[in-house]
Amino acid sequence: MALVFTLIAAALYLFASEKLPLDITAILIMVTLIAIPQLFHSQWLLERGVDLQAAFPTVSEGLSGLSSTATVTVLAMFILSAGIQRSGLVHVLGQRLFPMVGRSELRMILIIAALVGLISGFINNTAAVAVAIPLILDMARRLKLRASRLLMPVSFFGMLGGTLTLIGTSTNILASAILADHEDFGRQIGMFEFTHLGLIVLGVGLIYFVTIGRWLMPKKDLVRLSDDENRFVIELGVPADSPLVDQTLEEYSFAVKASVEVLKLVRGDAAHIKRAEHIRIRPDDIIQVHAELRQVMDLIKSGNVRVLSVSGESSPVRGDGKLVRVLLRDARQFEGREVRAAKFWDRYQARLIGLEKDALEERRIADEPLEAGGVALLEISRTALTRLRDADDLMILEESQDEFDRRRMWIAGGVMAAVVLGAALTPLPIVVTALLGVVAMVATGCVDKQDMYTGVSWPVIFLLAGVIPLGIAMTKSGAADLLAGLLATHAGDWHPILVLMALYLLTTLLTELVSNNASVVILVPVAVSLGHILQIDFFALVLAVMFAASTSFLSPIGYQTNTMIYGTGLYRFTDFAKVGAPLNLLLMVVTSIGIWWLWLV
């Protein structure tokens, strides 16, 4: 036991200090646990009561993390989440929900709770947050809201939503795998077995953010969001049957719905800048906007407006080609020449859609003078693109094709629903339905071969594989029983709610030092032993560990989603504790009472 505790202390130090990458530390732990009984087991130690082979994992047990149902399930969920993300389903949901926001921060928080919180219960919460971050940053920039006051709820609701189902977070899947191997439990946790408690936790988090949390969030962003990175000036025509006709852009909330910034309204020979959003739209008006590449793709598919291109005269974009960002590098060909005169169609069979500029000097894109070193957005067919790559007077910077389509969205959403319902309504375990879902995603084209590998967070996979043997060592050596006995000595006459709260607090603090998965591996065996000693249903104690590990808000290193938003540079390290500490204390009480009421009464 002393040797196991020494290894745990070394692992905690390496996890907390990050002297090595977390996944490398986990692999080092796995190898060390396997090597110790192989190298140092001896008769001399046996005679003195030290049986290393009985206390440490065997080779097969040490490698069991690589084939664990938890590891394989999380791997499959990453691929399924990549399919959902690649299909554009979350993007479209955001498009539908965000127009409800207006310019209200409170409504934005409610939308984040609905979008990120609920989706995180059914795809990996890290993937849900990764998809939401660019959407929220874009909305904050367009609506002039402080991004730091929106991204923190994104991360926190991702964690809260992960408590809704078994597959919401790798923590839940890992705890289920550990319990399935325990002789007194011997089964997988049900898909929705603790969803009612997760809904309570999510609801408490929502109430917290619309009341106390809003006043504790940062008052300003540490960095200013860029307003013009890869943003193009494009022109939109208004067809006669558009719902915009006879409305102002402000009344229609056009800028919010399309996630663009309106620059100018051109009507005949007149150009309106300051009043652009307050003039009633007529057919054939031209709307100039700033839009990013994703928004350009969405507008091309929109029936309300037509993205115009310059190929001699303005005409609607066809929408069946690739969008290409190009650098205009030949001064003799482009410097000072109007877009119309550059004859992109005649030279390259490409239609110029937009220019990467803050604003135009001229009224229309066709009349705008070009400059060497400028960046333009072209639409071009695949055949013509091959010739464009050989052009000497410009350089291709980026090629993009809109891969979002309704068919793929329906298929990806249907596959994910089938995975969840299959695990909930049939005898098949989640690992089997998830792997079947991966096969379906690949067979239907929702995930390609590259996504199967790039969509997986491999450090998380190797972290799981490496720490699982640590839990085996804690159980076999008696270390878990010893820790549980020490806790039981002090908590023997405590009310079960206080025992749950103590275990919750211990898990929260440990998660801030190490990963959420490592804390679960260490403390789930302790929770099981503690339940046996105190004659309390150990599943209730394991739930306290699971929920505490999944909702650790105190620092940017306590959970991966916090690390992701901290990486935007908008926050101080202490901002997380300021907002997260009251919520952690609140959830410690609410979750403990909820577990006691639902499982122990």
Image (spheres, helix red, strand yellow):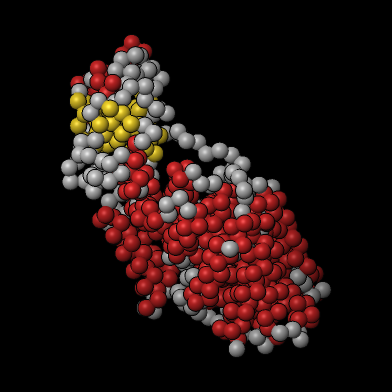
The picture quadrant where one finds residue 581 is bottom right
The residue sitting at 45% across, 34% down in the picture is: 229
The picture places residue 433, in percent across and down from the top left corner, at 38, 69
Q: Which of 288 and 441 is in front in this view?
A: 288
Residue 313, compared with residue 34, is above or below; it is above
Number of numbered labels in the structure image = 0
Which residue ends up furthest to the right in the rendered image? Answer: 48
Residue 549, compared with residue 368, is above or below; it is below
Residue 476, compared with residue 384, is above or below; it is below
Q: Nearer the viewer, residue 294 or 510?
A: 294
The residue sitting at 61% across, 74% down in the picture is: 590
Q: Could you tell me if residue 283 is visible in this image? A: yes
Position of the C terminus by quadrant = bottom right
The picture quadrant where one finds residue 426 is bottom left
The residue sitting at 62% across, 57% down in the picture is: 215
The picture places residue 299, in percent across and down from the top left corner, at 29, 42
The picture places residue 32, in percent across and down from the top left corner, at 67, 58
The residue sitting at 53% across, 51% down in the picture is: 151
Position of the N terminus by quadrant = bottom right
Q: Which of 201 and 109 is in front in this view?
A: 109
The picture places residue 210, in percent across and down from the top left corner, at 55, 62
Q: Could you tell me if residue 65 is visible in this image? A: no
Which residue ends up furthest to the top in the rendered image? Answer: 332
